[in-house]
Image (cartoon, coloured by chain):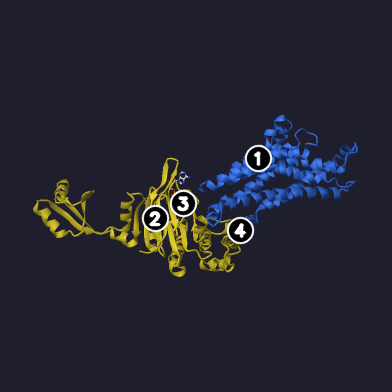
Chain colours: A yellow, B blue
Amino acid sequence: MSELVVETQDLTKKYGNFTAVDGIDLQVRKGEIYGFLGPNGAGKSTTIRMLLGLVKPTRGDARIFGLSIRQSPMEILKRVGAIVESPSYYGNLTAVENLEITRRILGADKKEIDRVLEIVNLSQWKNKKVKNFSLGMKQRLAIAQALLGNRELLILDEPTNGLDPAGIHEIRQLIKNLPGMLGVTVLMSSHILSEVELTATSVGIISRGRLLFQGTLEELRRKSENEICIEAHPQDKALKFLESKGLKVKARGNRLFIKKNSLDAAALNRALVMEGFDVTHLSTEGKNLEDIFLEITGGDAI
Amino acid sequence: MKKMLEVELLKLKNSWVLLVATLAPGFMVFQGVANFLRYYELFTSRGQNVWHQIYLQSSIFYVSAMLPVLITLIMVSIARIEYKSGGLRYFLTLPVKRSGVYAAKLIVGCMVCLFNVLVFSLSLLVAGKIINAPGSIPYDILARPFMAYIASLPVMIITFLLSINISQMAIPLGIGIGLALPSLLVANTRYWVFYPWTYPIMAALGGDFFEKAYFPFAAGFLIFVLLAFAGLRWFMEKDILD
Ligand SMILES: Nc1ncnc2c1ncn2[C@@H]1O[C@H](COP(=O)(O)OP(=O)(O)OP(=O)(O)O)[C@@H](O)[C@H]1O
Ligand SMILES: [Mg+2]
């Protein structure tokens, strides 16, 4: 088991009576890209703000590099680069001046500014005022700021939000290469499943403040094991019959679904026919991640 | 702390607030002197000191309206930089102490206000020289604006706290300017002690013999210290949600 970079216990945030984040236990391992996935309003940004000390947890604690964010925020933040609810910048300053603020606070080397500008491909715009930047350029500047000073953990809140397809592709590619290139760990939030699928190695799924799934992308995919889909008449009787055989059956529309596991579809068919049901359709189906996601989040749209 | 102050100054680069803080007091003196020259006969008919007349003409409007309005503008724009495009929520994810950020911003705000008052004094001096005011320079007219500055400390801390805690700048701007407007009226009533916006007026124009001459400074300093610490505790605890 590899080292945990981020670990939260029962992390909770209430705004008045409303629980925005409800007792979540995140675990982010060293060197991975952790996709923090959830629909709008799920509590991703609130969680990230708590990790960064912007918002005080109502309950619970967050540990980063084994240190508590309540007790040692300075030690932690030195080693963490962050984007919170994308673009944050000082518009009256140039890209270099924005980076200079970060550099001075961190006490990093002057050369760092050029290095990170190079990584995000902003060198040619470095002396332009940031308020005149396009959204994509602002986002790249934000990533450059997060990278400055060789930080070990990047916490990126919806880093591709609002970008055009080319920009999305570029940023995803950049993020994907970061652990290999710089050895950093990345915690990245998103409300787009395919984005997490394309970039992340681990996933945490949050909905209405609760963490509903956490594991590797592989583990998530494994949930998509096949189902047997049956159309048999009369349906209600067929359902009762299958359940009497100890099977877990779900009816959706005019079809019945059974987890395949080690079940033999042919044997099932034979049993139904022998019992006198009309079987008009029988197939085995794989769910895609979208279905799994919808199932996990209880149908919250993404 | 030096690093924090440098960073706060860097953030102000290209901001119009420094320009306004420089030009406005000079303009005020120019106005005052123009007024004085227009009614030269009237203002000197009883042999009044020309320097003092320039001072009076320039400072009535300056301390009663322009100074508090400028203070509001300065404090609001120092906070505005942070809220306009998420600067604060980024900056506070850097390894900085919130108390340090708060202190650096307050100090820079007060320094820009002081700068503005110094420009006013300097403008008086230059204006007096230009119109060849007779006699030696009465240095109290240079000290007075500085006293008005000290008496403005409550205005500074109140507008600072409103600005830094409220991300919509219209609110601190409205309150700051709204409270500045009636100050000259209130200054003529005995309720002025309850209205910190009158303190600079009393300090600058109150004369040496008004009762409680010490009051604007003592109360002003006390209010500043109390509110500065209360505001600091608040800022350190507050959730950054913008
Ligand atoms: N200051 C606040 N007061 C009250 N409720 C809030 C506050 N901030 C956020 N919320 C609520 O908390 C919930 C979680 O918000 P959060 O911004 O963390 O969601 P999110 O997952 O980042 O969503 P999005 O994808 O839209 O960015 C939302 O329902 C939001 O309305
Ligand atoms: Mg969000």
Look at the image and tell me in which quarter the N terminus of chain B lies.
bottom right
Q: Is residue A43 toward the left or the right of residue A93 in the image?
A: left
Q: For mark 1, give the secondary structure.
A: helix
Q: CB atoms at circles 2 and 1 under 8 Å apart? A: no
- List the residue tagged with mark 3: A50
Name the mark nearer the viewer: 3 or 1: 1
**How far, Cα to Cα, is label 2 from label 3?**
12 Å
A8 or A289: which is nearer to us?
A: A8
Amino acid beneath label 4: Leu
- Asked if the beta carbon under badge 1 is closer than 8 A to the nearest atom of ligand 1, the reply is no
Q: Do tags 4 and 1 sit on the same chain?
A: no
Q: Do tags 3 and 1 sit on the same chain?
A: no
* Mark found first going from the N terminus, 3 or 4: 3
Q: For mark 3, give the secondary structure.
A: helix
- List the residue tagged with mark 2: A26
> How many residues crowd mark 4 within 10 Å: few (<14), some (14–19), many (20+)?
many
Amino acid beneath label 3: Met
- List the residue tagged with mark 1: B223
A52 or A283: which is nearer to us?
A: A52
Task: Tell me the subunit letter for badge 1.
Answer: B
Task: Tell me the subunit letter for badge 3.
Answer: A
> How many residues crowd mark 3 within 10 Å: few (<14), some (14–19), many (20+)?
many
Q: Which image quarter: residue A194?
A: bottom left
